[in-house]
Structures are given as C-alpha cells and as structure tokens.
C-alpha cells in the first residue's frame, strides 16, 4: 500500500470524526460499550497526541496525555489531528521510531495504524448518529491483514494474553481480493494469504468482515461456515 493512500484515508476519516465532534457529545456510541461521543473524541485526541510525540521524538511515551473535559474537547481534537497530518507529511517513514508491535520499529508503522484507527472510529462515531457508511474495501482488507499480522502477532508475544484458538480459520472478502487462512499452535501464528479450508470460514464484504473482527458487528452480519465455536475462540484472542 502506498503511504500516500494511507494519508488520504487518515485525512478523510479524521475530518469526518471532527465534523461529528461538533454535534451532541453526550450521544451514546453503541459499538463502544459505555462510551459517549465525548469519550470517543477524547480517545482519538489522546491517540493523536501520543502518535505526534512518537513521530516527533522517536521514543515511547510515558503515558497518555491528560485532557480537559467538556466543550473544549473538539478544539483539542482538531489541534491534535492537524498536527498528525503535518507529521505524516514531514516525517521520513524509514526513520527509527517506537511502535507497540513486534515488527520493525520504524515510522511507517504509524501511517497504516492511523488509517485503520481513524476508519474504525469514524464508523463508531457515525453509529451515534445512525448514519454509518462502510469502510473503503481496500482499506478494510488491509485492516483485516493488520488484525492478524500486527495486532494478533503482537498480542501473542504477551504471555499474559490468551494464546489459544480452537482450530483454523479462513476469512474471504467477497467485494475485493483478499483471503487469509490462519492456525495457531503453541502461540505461533501461521498466516497465509490463500484460499484453503478452515474449521470455520467467514465470508462477506471487507468492511463487514473487519468490523466483525473488531467486535463492532455481530457474526451474523457475515456468512459463517463450519464451527462457530472456533470463530468465537479467534475473536476472543486480541487484547481489544
């Protein structure tokens, strides 16, 4: 994926979150249990602030930023978002920069992560106003790959997080090219971008599949074939 395309998605979805931040901040965000729109905007502001710190200093932040509560949250969001866009435009993606994954510790990680973060939370924010639009298929397929290859691999490196899945899984996008077959043995993830039979298979458009993996939509949203208990075991793996 071209990094410039990630920037385009960060801008589009981040701008949309900013638009929604000017609405009713007390509205519930159904996919995020217990969150209001204000909580979501504050979360995104903290995330952007943390990423800005990493891109500007290269090191792991000591803690999330403290934020004022109340009507000023949209202002802090806008400032943090604009700063992220500036840092993505000026940072050398090959520079050594901390990230939380088990992969390479380089700045380019944050282009993809911010594109995925803003896409899913844009969908969350829209759910508070009953107007969710799907995630771009290409971005969503990339997000499925990130769910397995970045989030899951990184979580499995933490011995405090469950590393057991009941069988193999196959994920198949129906609106764009994209398939993943995965097994998990002794905390070792075997991930292949192939069409292969799994103990459970899920099929659907890329946006719905990604949102199911992230617990935003019920599994009934997509086609489930095989052992549903295996799917449940995979969905319980990431520390989300």
Image: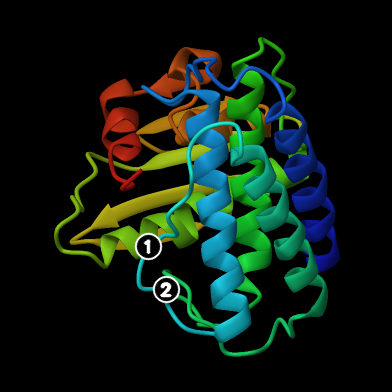
User: Residue 154, position in %: x, y?
Assistant: 36, 64
Q: Nearer the viewer, residue 198 or 32?
A: 32
User: Residue 235, position in %: x, y?
Assistant: 35, 35
Please give the name of the residue rendered at 79% of the width and 68% of the height, measured from the top-left corner: 86
Identify the coloring. Answer: rainbow
Q: Of the numbered discs in the image, which one, if any, rests on residue 123?
A: none
User: Residue 87, position in %: x, y?
Assistant: 74, 72
**In what quadrant of the picture does the N terminus appear?**
bottom right
Based on the displayed image, in which of its 4 quarters is residue 199 positioned?
A: top left
User: Residue 74, position in %: x, y?
Assistant: 66, 38
Query: Is residue 79 depicted above or below 103 in this figure?
Result: above
Query: Is residue 132 depicted above or below 38 in this figure?
Result: above
Packing grade of label 1 (10 A; few <14, some 14-19, many >=20) is many
Please give the name of the residue rendered at 75% of the width and 41% of the height, measured from the top-left corner: 13
Q: Nearer the viewer, residue 198 or 11?
A: 11
Q: Nearer the viewer, residue 113 or 46?
A: 46
Query: Is residue 41 depicted above or below 28 in this figure?
Result: below
Please give the name of the residue rendered at 54% of the width and 85% of the height, measured from the top-left corner: 58
Q: Nearer the viewer, residue 62 or 93?
A: 62
Packing grade of label 2 (10 A; few <14, some 14-19, many >=20) is some
> Label 1's element?
helix
Tell whether 184 sits left or right of 224: left
Q: Of the numbered discs in the image, which one, if any, rests on residue 61?
A: 2
- Answer whether labels 1 and 2 touch (C-beta < 8 Å): no
Q: CA distance from mark 1 to mark 2?
A: 22 Å
**In what quadrant of the picture does the C terminus appear?**
top left
Q: Is residue 204 visible?
A: no
Residue holding disc 1: 153
Please give the name of the residue rendered at 42% of the width and 77% of the height, measured from the top-left corner: 60
> Label 2's element?
loop
């Amino acid at each position: 994926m071209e990094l410039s395309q990630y920037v385009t998605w960060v801008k589009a979805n981040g701008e949309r979150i900013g638009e929604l931040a000017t609405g009713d901040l007390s509205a519930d965000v159904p996919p995020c249990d217990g969150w209001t729109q204000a909580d979501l905007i504050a979360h995104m502001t903290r995330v952007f602030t943390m990423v800005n710190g990493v891109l500007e200093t290269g090191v792991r932040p000591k803690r999330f930023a403290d934020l004022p509560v109340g009507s000023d949250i949209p202002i802090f969001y806008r400032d943090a978002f604009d700063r992220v866009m500036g840092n993505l435009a000026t940072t050398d993606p090959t520079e050594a920069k901390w990230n939380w994954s088990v992969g390479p510790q380089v700045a380019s990680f944050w282009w993809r992560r911010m594109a995925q973060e803003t896409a899913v939370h844009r969908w969350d924010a829209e759910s508070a106003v009953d107007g969710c639009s799907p995630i771009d298929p290409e971005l969503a397929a990339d997000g499925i790959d990130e769910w397995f290859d970045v989030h899951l691999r990184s979580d499995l490196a933490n011995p405090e997080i469950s590393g057991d899945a009941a069988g193999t899984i196959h994920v198949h996008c129906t609106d764009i090219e994209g398939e993943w077959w995965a097994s998990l043995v002794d905390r070792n993830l075997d991930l292949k971008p192939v069409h292969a039979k799994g103990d459970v298979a899920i099929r659907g458009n890329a946006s719905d599949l990604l949102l199911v993996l992230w617990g935003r939509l019920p599994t009934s949203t997509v086609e489930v074939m095989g052992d549903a208990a295996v799917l449940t075991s995979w969905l319980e793996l990431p520390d989300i």
